[in-house]
Structures are given as C-alpha cells and as structure tokens.
Amino acid sequence: MILDKINTPEDLRQLPEDSLIQLCADIRQKIIEDCAENPGHLGASLGVIELTVALHYVLNTPYDNLIWDVGHQSYAHKILTGRKDQFKMKRQFGGISGFPKMSESKYDSFGTGHSSTSISAALGMAIAAKINGETDRQSVAVIGDGSMTGGLAFEALNNAGVHNSNLLVILNDNNMAIDPNIGGLNDYLLDVTTSKTYNKLKEDVWHILGKLNRISPGMRSFIQNVDNSLKSLLLKRSNLFEAMGLRYFGPVDGHDVNHLVKILRDMKKINGPKLLHCITVKGKGLKQAEADQTTWHAPGKYNKDTGELIKEQNPSPTPKFQDVFGYTLLELARTNDKILGITPAMPTGCSLNIMMKEMPERCFDVGIAEQHAVTFSAGLAAKGFIPYCNIYSSFMQRAYDQVIHDTALQNLQVVFCLDRGGIVGADGATHHGAYDLAYFRCIPNLTISAPLNEEELRNLMYTGQLPHQQGPLVIRYPRGNGFMTNWKTPFQELPIGKGRCMIEGEEIALLSIGAIGNLAPKAIARIPRPTIGWYDMRFLKPIDEELLHTIFSKFKKIITLEDGTIIGGLGSAVIEFMNKYHYTARVSRLGIPDKFIEHGSQQQLYKLCGYDEEAIYNQICSLLKE
C-alpha cells in the first residue's frame, strides 16, 4: 500500500501525481476497516478523501491553515497528519479525538466539534496572516455535511466579502447532514449543480479567471462582470456567494483527485476571498453507505467485507430516551392538534422522525440552525401552538440569546427537550451536555426539569402541553438507554417544582436530579444500615423549597448528585438555599468538575469525574466517618 509510506503531508508531497488515486483507495480501505471495529462518523469522511489528499498535496500544511467543518469529516486528514497508527483508537478513552483538536496536532488549525464555525475562524487567520505580512499563507475552510445552513457561516461570508484576504472556502456539497439537507440553500445549490448550460460555459470562464493576475485591472474587472452576468442569467437568479463578495468557482467533481489538484493550484494564484463548490457523495466507496447515507453517517460496528451491520449480541431490553421522546410526542400530538415538533437537522438523532412519518406537516427540520429553531418555536407559541423544540444539550449553547430574549422574556409556552444532557461518551468535550442546568438556571420564567426515567420523561412531556402550563419548560435527558421495560404507562400531570423522597434515611441525605440518580440506590444498598435518605428533586427551577426545608431540618450531612457541571447546578442551588435560610450542614457536591472532559465511554467518564456508583459509595462512607 502506498499509504504505508505516508506519515505526514511532507511524505505525501513527494509522491508523483499519478499515485494519488491509489493513495485515496488505500485511505478509503483503512477507514472502512478501522471503523468496522471501532465505530465512528464513517459516511462524511469517506466523502472527502480525494479532497483531503488534494488539499494536503497542494497546500503547505501546517504553515497553511486548513479547517474542517463539521469536524467529523477529518478522518483522512488525521491519517495523513501523523495519526495513522493511532486511528484505531479514535474516540476511545486515552485515544485520539474524533474531531480536529488544536492540542492534538499542529495540523489541526482549529477545533471543530460543532458546525458552521470554519469560515469565521479561517477569515480570522487570513486577516492575521495579512497583518503579519505573510502573503504566501493560505487559509482554507472546508465546510459541508450540512454546516453551510448555520447562521454563523453566512455572517462570516458576509464579512469575508469586504476583506481582500487570502481566504478559500470549499463547499463540500453532498446534500446531507445526518438526514438529507432541506431549505432554500439546498434548492439553490441543486440548481447550480444541475444547470447543464452553466456547467458547460463555466470551464471556459474558469480558464480566463485563472489568468487574472496576468491581465490588466480594467480587463480583469470586465471579465469578472461578464462571468457574474453569465452565472446570474443561466441560473435565473443572482449568485449568492458572489453577491456577498466572494468569487465563486464550480461546481467540480470532488472525487477527481487529479483535477482537484490542478484546480487548487490555480486558485492559489487568485487573490482575494473565493469559494470552490465541490460535489461529493457521502459514504463514497462503500455501497451500503452510499445507498443509506443516514444510517451510515455513524453506523456502529459492521462487517468490513460484506458491509452488513452487526447487531448487539445482548441488546438492552429498555428503550433509548430519544425513542421515548419520539413515541411520546406522537402519542400526545394525536390528541392535541396544537403540538408541533421542531429540530435543527436531527430528526433521526432525536427520533422526531417517528412523528414525521405519520404527521410530516406538523414536524419541521430547520437545518443546522439552533438559533432559528428556538425563535421559530417562539413565533409558533406566540400564535397558540405548543412547539416541542428538540435540540442536543451542547448544541443549545448556540441559541442561548434566543431562549432568553425571544422565549423566556415573553413567557411563551415552548417545551425545550434537551437530548444528550450530561456526559455523552465518545464524541468528547465538544458534545458533552455539561452546562445546560447551570446556564439555564439563571433565566427568569424558565422551568427546568430532568426525569429520573422513561416514565418521568413521558409525564413531563404530558405536563408541558397542558392548558394551564405557562411559560417555557426545559426537559433534559441523557444519551442512551433508559431503565424501564414497562415505560408506556398512563400519563400523569407532575406538579411543577416538586421533588420526592425515594428512600427514608437517618444520617445522610443524597439529593439527585435526572437519570444519574439511578446510581443512588445501588450505592446506598451497599451500606449495611438504613442511614442514607435519597431524594429525587425532579426540578432544578423552581426547586422544591418545602422539601429542602424538611431535608435541612433533619440532616447535617448532604450529598448532591448531578450529571452536569457542579458550578451553578443542583449543588450550587442547594448551597444557595442553605445560605438563604441560615441552615448549617456539610454539603458534598458530585458532578462534572470545572474542566473540559475528554472522550471515552460514559461509565469511564463518570468514574473520571468522580460520580459513578463507586464514587458515590466512597463519598457516603467518608461522610459516615466524620
């Protein structure tokens, strides 16, 4: 294999161009083989192998800045940049990240675990190079897999057009995020890629524009105007990117590595901000991945030879929390025609697709656009509908202002369902839902809840749509399977702001919120005498002060347990209550410490953070000795 000889981009650049096709095949084979045993984001990385090879072949990385967005496109990049031997351990505890990470490699110019950030970052780097007089330094943003629908990408494009910086945006257009792309931008790009007349003429215009630096300024301006007019005329609309001040090139075949090398060499000679539109196939080179791109976005384990998905040997008898959300929302929507489902590009990931199949007219995938998802939901609520806006906890961070200004300030009845609350596992620091309890607790009018199990999730969702429920409600729940086989029980309204005593005790009170509380009875059961009381708080805001008065009147030793940062969460709320009412007690807080947590399994990371079953047990024993 040619890949055996390649450890860095410097090695790659020593190859003759006629070797690049075989190198791409070698990389594709390695990704398919390694991801079969150690799963990851397969489809997106298979789709950019030729583009990755061409970029590192033409660019002088790491001197040139190369940013991948979304970062799960970066597997081939990692293999070519000194991490080939570590690739089998990607996303595992102690292994390399599944996303670009500046502290991991000098070739990772910018960390990109979320989406739509690359153009802003690359523009910043391009301007920095310009200020430093580094006129030969390239700054390239590869944006795709749905990332272009994010609002930040358009803010950056708008700003990039007014700076004469050495910025190249590569639009990796595969018509997919996790699910198929939707919206006006997708329709526009489809027009561009299917216009035969435009695609026939653009090659000639490209040839002329590639020589612009050797043409007089007046002729250069004339040719650019002619090019823009041709594009607008043939596409029957203005060119979106050139309207923002970026010179547009393409579309080109993103799987023709030799042609990409030629194009990228030409584009290095063209000054100013520019965009190259590449057409790629998500899952390229693996038949099953091309045919079912949603499933093969991150398929889990599979047979590398046959492509057959490998089912778990002992599947959990309990459902995933996300599926409980999906089936419950459909059940509620059948009886309440005001209920709508909203998600930013995650209908499969959050299981809104369950309701979509039966009621497509009442479900809205708004693309990777969390800010829009929240304010869109607020607008619906202002007109009497009850939107269930489902956003992953770590992605909700991007819509914080919209929750405050557009929803909570106006006290609108939006039900925010935060999937992936707490530690999520292999996706690591960029995806852990560590901060939602803390950053939402300070917002007025916001009710914050976390169910202990699937039945509680159902009942909270039911409570959120009742006519007398006022204002926005947050329901956060974890990634993965629940705890109940008989979870589909009759709906019950849950009183807002009320917790419950689960186990009576004498010496220590353990207060938990959310599904992590299921570890509490396991740890308590290891104590030989009935000294530990357990309380499921259910609501962080409003917190159950009546229950807290009872607890502080009885116990002098208290443990709080949460699958979130201990700064600002349940533990902080309990200490604030204690101070407000002048109680004295020894309060120990268990939760995510004040640092970014890396990737690994959920159980490994619970242990690392000090709130797995063993850590809870040890904390109880320590307090009993005091």
Image: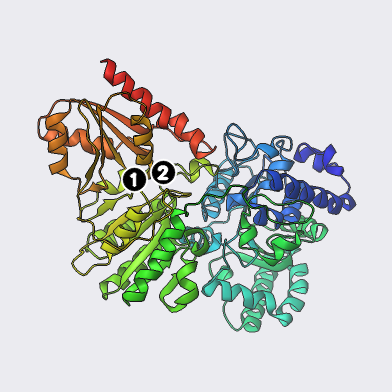
Which mark sits nearer the N-terminus, 2 or 1?
2
| Lateral position of residue 78 relative to residue 613, left or right | right
Q: Residue 35 appears at what percent x and percent y? A: 69, 47
| Lateral position of residue 420 relative to residue 135, left or right | left
Question: What's the CA distance linking mark 2 and mark 1?
Answer: 9 Å
Tag 2–tag 1 contact (CB < 8 Å):
yes
Secondary structure at numbered mark 1:
loop
Query: What coloring was used for the rendering?
Result: rainbow
Q: Which mark is residue 205?
A: none
Q: Measured along the vertical axis of the image, is residue 589 above or below residue 421?
A: above
Q: Residue 574 appears at what percent x and percent y? A: 21, 36
- Amino acid at circle 2: Gly
* Residue at 69%, 80% in the rendered image: 195
* Residue at 74%, 51% in the rendered image: 303
Secondary structure at numbered mark 2:
loop
Q: Quadrant of the N terminus?
A: top right
Q: Measured along the vertical axis of the image, is residue 302 above or below residue 224?
A: above
Q: Measured along the vertical axis of the image, is residue 285 above or below residue 34?
A: below
Quickly name the residue at label 2: 422
For the residue carrying disc 1, how many other residues have a C-alpha within 10 Å: few (<14), some (14-19), or many (20+)? many
* Residue at 61%, 63% in the rendered image: 294
> Farthest residue in the top direction?
625
Q: Residue 416 appears at what percent x and percent y? A: 34, 59
Is residue 280 among what the camera can see? no
Q: Which mark is residue 514?
A: 1
Q: Quadrant of residue 405?
A: bottom left
Camera-side residue: 389 or 129? 389
